[in-house]
Image (cartoon, rainbow, N blue to C red):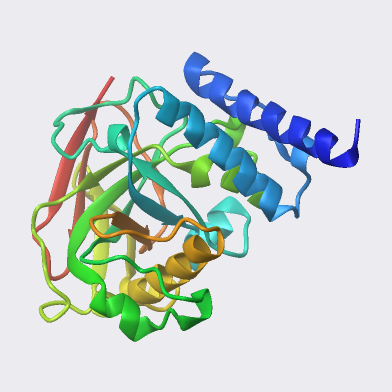
Amino acid sequence: MTSSDAVADRIRAASERLVRAQETRTPCAPVRDLIGTEDLDAAYAVQRGVVERRLASGAVVVGRKIGATSKAVQDQLGVDQPDFGYLLDDMDVSAHDPISMAGLLQPRVEAEVAFVLSQDIDPGSPDDITLEAVRESVEVALPSLEIVDSRISGWDIGFTDTVADCASSGLYVVGRDARTLAELEPRDVDMTLAIDDEVRSSGNGAACLGDPLEALRWLAVQAARFGDPLRKGHLVLSGALGPFVPFAPGDRVVATISGFAPLAVTFTD
């Protein structure tokens, strides 16, 4: 067996471990024993393997999510840089209330600014993706809640673990109160997230890589470099504006992001 064959086998084994954890709803051991702690190409290859399994089962890619954009969340996860994952149509629970927690393992919730793209972000070179080009590609901004989750037991993750685990994705909720960028400046928003009327998290747009639009630019560059650019109509969750928090069945979660109507959901078993 060649070294490249051995790497491919480890990537497949890591993908299978994560898929099995989701299917059995039983958290698994970290995958860094298989792919190491620094090989991001291998980690994203594992992620692609997991996503491809879900696509083969009928899921459809509808956008991307950016993870670990705020210092608060990086500190919670023990990482020092952002990552990204795919949004699939079966992750969208915006029309559900209450939202079932049945398919979740170790969920947390965070509030974010989401963007819908009016055009592809697919330049000749990733180096050509400017903040202005990204701004011109945004149709609207929306309030959102991301229900992050980890297939890895106890959230015992390093950076390659969370990348491989689809950027610790779970479900998401997007509000209907859309704003154009002429109406709202994402970096200037303030956020509070309350559970049963108790504020549990707070932050602002500047906490998200300095500006949620800068987070979107970062993602567009990475997507282009990986050969899968962002497309017209894609939804992008730009990253948490403050720390994520745990929640339980019966909890009422309300995200208030200035410039938008509050976004409220209830969770059930």
The residue depicted at 58 percent of the width and 48 percent of the height is: 163
Give 61 or 93, whichever is nearer the viewer: 61
User: In which quadrant will I find the C terminus?
Assistant: top left
Q: Quadrant of the N terminus?
A: top right
Residue depicted at x 50% and y 59% = 68
Q: Is residue 121 above or below residue 265?
A: below
Question: Which residue is painted at 23% across and 44% down in the image?
Answer: 173
Up/down of 104 relative to 188, above or below: above
Question: Residue most toward the top?
Answer: 24
x and y percent of residue 3 in the render? Answer: 89, 40
Between residue 247 and residue 3, name the one nearer to us.
3
> Does residue 91 appear in the picture of this structure?
yes
At 33% from the left and 30% from the top, the residue drawn is: 248
Q: Quadrant of residue 59?
A: top left
Image location of residue 57, percent across then percent down: 40, 22
> For the image shown, how many numbered marks are present on the structure?
0
Specify the farthest residue to the front. 124
Q: Is residue 208 visible?
A: no
- In the rendered image, residue 157, in percent from the top left (x then y), is placed at 64, 43
Q: Position of residue 218 (x, y in %)?
A: 47, 71
Q: Is residue 238 left or right of residue 152?
A: left
Q: Quadrant of residue 148?
A: top left
